Image (cartoon, helix red, strand yellow):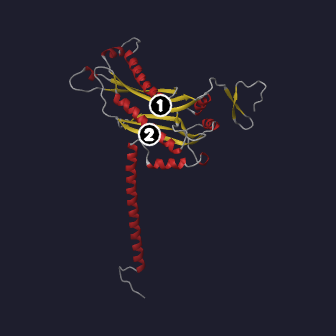
Amino acid sequence: MPFFGLGSRSPGEDAARAAQKQERERVAELAKANREAEIKRQASDLRALAAGGLPIQAIERLKEIGTNEASEILFTSNLAPEEAGLLRREGFHPRGIVTGSAVYHVGQAYASSQGDCEVSVLSTAYNEACRLAVGRMAQELKMIGGHGVVGVRFSLVRHEWADKTIEVQVMGTAVEGPGRPPEQPFMCDLSGQEWYALRRAGYDPVAFVWGHCTWFLLTTQQDEWVHRSWSNVEMTHWSAGLSKARTRAMAHLNKQASAYGANGVAGVKIERRLDEIRLSGPGEDPAYEREHHNIVISILGTAIRARPGAPRHVTPTLNILSLRDGRLTPVSMTTPKDATIE
């Protein structure tokens, strides 16, 4: 029988220690490989985002959704049940939520101490951030193989922790319709009911369009007198500034709609933001002592186009609830009085 002195180890213990050391080295090598792969993935994501693309993980997820049939996937949607039902009635099926986002840095902006003007740097930043976010949502839609996006929700934020940063987020439900996906899928911020009503009237949604304008209002001595007045009086300077900002934002929206060959823009929404600012510069100027304002006008909507051969008149319908199976059935309002409706 072998004898082992104090502090000595048996061959079995040596083998176990060697195996543990080998396992630790293998885990360390695996962790190092994972870190290097993650660094490469992050670098690749940054290059893709800089080019207006999508990160790798998003691409893999979307490709997996796109390879499955609509009846085989567990989809997510921001549509209400009745909206999804109307889409299905027209042969469209939800495929999943698609998103797009962009955090955009605003460059150095200048305003005049002599009069009102558009702050072009800010207007361009808002419009460009929207273009990037909507473009990424369009890329996700194409990877899924959808025909369009319904119920687009738009969010624009100026962060308090970063005054020169704009965050834009868009989200909607990708839908698949009959036939092959079109080369230019549609996007709309309309509800399912609004989308259904447009289709019945012979219109198709084309694209989600927008226009932003930042207009600088230089507070004058006259403005201060009006503000301190005891009488009811219109602040004409502010009214004119709102009108000019709205006109320029609308021009950008109409230019987009015209580029898509649209007949009009439906569901237009106008949002306003007011920021108080102060001017600074060399020398002495009374304008530096007053509070001035930036008006940000955002106009959003859905560009629509009439289908060839669309009916000139639409027969009104009424949804009838069946007491047998609980289904809603649209019935023409011109139905004869002696007709039986179940």
Neighbourhood count class around disc 1 (C-alpha, 10 Å): few under 14, some 14–19, many 20 upward: many
Neighbourhood count class around disc 2 (C-alpha, 10 Å): few under 14, some 14–19, many 20 upward: many
Residue 209 is tagged as: 1
Instruction: Name the residue at 41% across, 21% down.
Output: 242
Query: Furthest-front residue in view?
Result: 308
Which image quarter holds the C terminus? Answer: top right
Which image quarter holds the N terminus? Answer: bottom left
Residue 237 x %, y % = 37, 17
Residue 321 is tagged as: none
Q: Nearer the viewer, mark 1 or mark 2?
A: 1
* Amino acid found under the numbered disc labelled 2: Ser
Query: Furthest-bottom residue in view?
Result: 1
Query: Furthest-left residue in view?
Result: 283
Q: Is residue 298 visible?
A: no
Residue 246 occupies quadrant: top left
The answer to whether residue 313 is left or right of residue 106 is right
Q: Which residue is mark 2?
A: 101
The correct choice, above or below, for 230 with respect to 82 in the image is: above
Q: Nearer the viewer, residue 66 or 246?
A: 66
Instruction: Name the residue at 50% across, 35% down.
Output: 153
Precedes in sequence: disc 1 or disc 2: 2
Instruction: Name the residue at 36% across, 80% down.
Output: 8
Residue 130 x %, y % = 43, 34
Residue 280 occupies quadrant: top left
* Amino acid found under the numbered disc labelled 1: Val
